[in-house]
Image (tube, rainbow, N blue to C red):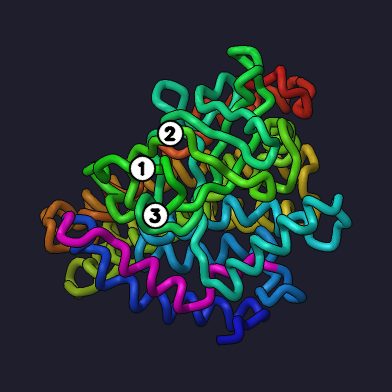
Amino acid sequence: MTLPTQLDDLLKLAAETGDRLAPLAADTDAGRDNGHETYRILRESGLLALLVPQEAGGAGLGFGDYWRVLAELGAHNGAAALGFNMHHVVIGALADAAGTRLPPAAETFRAWMLDEVVNGRKLFASATSEAGRGAKLRGMQTRYRLSDDGTHYILSGKKSFVSLAGAADYYVVAAAAESGAEDTGEASHFVVAADDPGVSFGTVQHMSAMYGTSTAPMTLDEVRVPRSRLYLGVEGMSLFKVVREPHWMVAGYTGAYLGIAEALFRHTVDHVTASPARADSPVVQQELGRMSARLRAARALVHEAGDLVTAERGSLEANAMVHAAKYVVGEAGPQLAQDALRLCGSAAVSRSHPLERLIREAQFAHVMPAKPQECLEYLGKAAVGVNLYDARAFAW
């Protein structure tokens, strides 16, 4: 299928796809299936190519509009939207570089990866987090070295919380050079195929929510990766990229959590309006008004921050705004969940009602990087004039 390029058409496609994803959410959340059907549907929809430049066969969507589409999916199936974003986190840097001439190795890599997405319908995922370190790139324990004949990189290490485990075709793995210092920040990324010898996954973790992300530990045992699969053909630049342009690493998930907040409000309104007497209560209307105001404020900030990244990617203000948006959405979701509990009572805690799942899912915004305290620290550093382009200013 040919992917639409106009936002309205893409939002319509996302809504139609979401309608197919929504009925799957409850069974996946309960562990009755592995959630992989949601990613088959997303592949089939063509939405994996949202960020791919139009000349390469994609929609060429900017970051702000990507968040709008992601929120639409998140309102239907939050876990599927998070997994969908994992794919775009690793496609994002390629999309950001659209129209920029790159060295030959980088051009070849970009063309290969985009073709895999558009024509191969391949699903990518990120493998960064490590036990005890989270997603921080400095001090990475997964290591790589060049093979004796110089044709491959050899990766060894363990990753924790790898989403799309067993569902993705490729994993973009962060690793530090074997010869580097213990606290080196010179991390690189490599594209590892799911069926590369030496790649294995542990048991999918049964978390309190978001089981549908298919998250599991990953082991790399002397995995040989062709030199052509070094991300953009450059070693040691990953931390520099995150510091200069942090929007994917720290805030890509934000659109999905906005969608979950939207769904929380919608289901609460539906429950209240099912009882005309309750809906006519001024007290209930005030509570809904508070929820509406919180949601509108979060939505406005997300849209403004996303559009600013599209217009001024890497600017200090855009970087600060995405941290602010991530923080505010992470606060708004749990607040709306508490409001829903007050208004809906037993419906909000019954496993038979979508509200119960949404209330659990909303809490996970605090787990995903950047965490609330990291967002606040970034904004505080911006306020006092710290050089936010200096990697030494952060724990990344």
Quarter of the view holding residue 244? top right
| Label 1: which secondary element | strand
Label placed on residue 244: none
Which quadrant of the rendered structure holds the C terminus?
top right
The residue shown at (35%, 37%) is 217
Using the rendered image of the protein, determine whether residue 170 is visible from the camera's viewpoint.
yes
Quarter of the view holding residue 146? top right
Q: Is residue 86 above or below residue 200?
A: below
Q: Position of residue 299 (x, y in %)?
A: 54, 57
Which mark sits nearer the N-terminus, 3 or 2? 2
The amino acid type found where label 1 is placed reads Ser
Q: Nearer the viewer, residue 148 or 230?
A: 148
Quarter of the view holding residue 153? top right
| Label 3: which secondary element | helix
The residue stretch that appears in magenta = 31-52
Using the rendered image of the protein, determine whether residue 265 is visible from the camera's viewpoint.
no
Q: Is residue 378 magenta?
A: no
**Which residue is farthest front?**
149
Task: State the CA–CA distance, disc 3 to disc 1.
Answer: 44 Å
Task: State the CA–CA distance, disc 3 to disc 2.
Answer: 49 Å
Q: Is residue 137 above or below residue 74?
A: above
Judge the density around disc 1: few (<14), some (14-19), many (≥20) Cα neighbours within 10 Å.
Answer: some
Label placed on residue 221: 2
Mark 1–mark 2 contact, CB under 8 Å?
yes
Judge the density around disc 2: few (<14), some (14-19), many (≥20) Cα neighbours within 10 Å.
Answer: some
Identify residue for label 3. Answer: 291
Identify residue for label 1. Answer: 200
The amino acid type found where label 3 is placed reads Met
